[in-house]
Image (cartoon, rainbow, N blue to C red):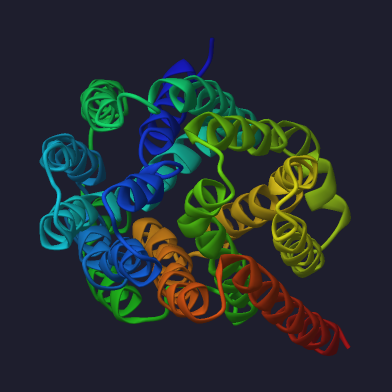
Amino acid sequence: MKGLNLYLINGMYWITASLYLPFITMYFSQKGMDSMQIGILSALLPIASLTVQPLWAALADRTGRRRRVLILLNLCCAAAVLLFPGTGSFGEILGAVTCYALFNSAVLPICDALVVSQAEEKGINFAWVRMCGTVSYAAIVLGMGFYLKKHMNLMFYGNSACFLLFTLLCLTLPKDKKTLKAQEQERRGPEADQTVKKAGKGPTFQSKEIYLILLFAFAMQFGINYYSAFLGVYLLELGYSQSLLGVLNCISALSEIPVLLLIHRLSRRYKETVLLTAAVGCMALRLILLSAGNVALMAAAQLLQGPSYMVCYFVCVTYINRMVVPGKISQGQSTLAFVQMGLGSLSGSLLGGVLASVYGIKEGFLIIAFLLLAITVAAGITAGWRRT
């Protein structure tokens, strides 16, 4: 099967994510953390995305050793996640999350940069590659939801083991190429040196439309990070357990499959800004449904994961790979991670923590939903104005 390693790499990354992201705030809550503390702990990964992650991406691009950097990050994540078992106080958990975030924040953008470029090089539809990640995430999160009720630390040991397997799979990627500077000098001669220097100092993207794309990415992550940070805690408040959280996350992951099957057709028919406007609007509706506290409506909300998050993720990742200046592929994806996993997630965690503490988690869902609707209307009007 052509490009089998790309499917396995993407699938294994999302397995590592499924063993941490859906359940970590429930772990915080069971350790006695309140809403404000959960918001602070959830903000550490976004802070790392703002501060440390761009440095990893710049290192990968400037040295040309993207695969090696990714492997190093994977090994560090495998070690750092083992700090969690045995933590009890807020300070201990804070230290473990900080250490893990320093490395984990850079894994996805560098992995996406490598996998998307390899898929394009081999003529493979990235939507199919990403679908492997979706199915893997759904299967693991459903099964783990039932086990974690009595064995919460299992998620950390499993996460570590999967990062080691992820490392082995990354070894199947092509060996790191020479830096952009060296490639250009060999292909076009010594005069290319000055051109590459200028490109390195110039803009990362070829179009100013990127700012509008990044605004949508920010809005989506703002909403989804509040949902991710407090859904588990919300379910505990309602009297439910990890098993329901696993089922809900499985539903959300499976809802991505129809979107991935249709996304190329949709991308050819509609502009990126149209798709992103619809996606953020779906995210707002999703938060409104979650606020009901009814299992049936929460399940319906999870069915909107595909039309909201996956549309936004796919459109942003592929747009950036298409519009990035040659030689800055990791920095292009890093910019998306900076805005999305950094600014958007940080806002969702910190502001979300304040809203949950002052008004309650349910009311927080509604407030953020209306904020997203306002951003969607403003961005949609701006996109329409740009077209005219």
Would you place residue 304 above or below residue 151 in this image? below
Would you place residue 305 above or below residue 135 in this image? below
Q: Position of residue 28 (x, y in %)?
A: 31, 52
Label count reads: 0
The image quadrant of residue 306 is top right
Does 250 sit left or right of 281 as displayed? left
Q: Relative to the observer, which residue lies in front, 284 or 115?
A: 284
> Extreme top residue here?
1
Does 154 sit left or right of 140 as displayed? left
Would you place residue 19 above or below residue 32 in this image? above
Which corner quadrant holds the N terminus? top right
Can you see residue 181? no
> Extreme front residue here?
239
Q: Position of residue 31 (x, y in %)?
A: 26, 49
Does 312 sit left or right of 200 as displayed? right
Which corner quadrant holds the C terminus? bottom right
Determine the residue positioned at 76% across, 49% down.
307
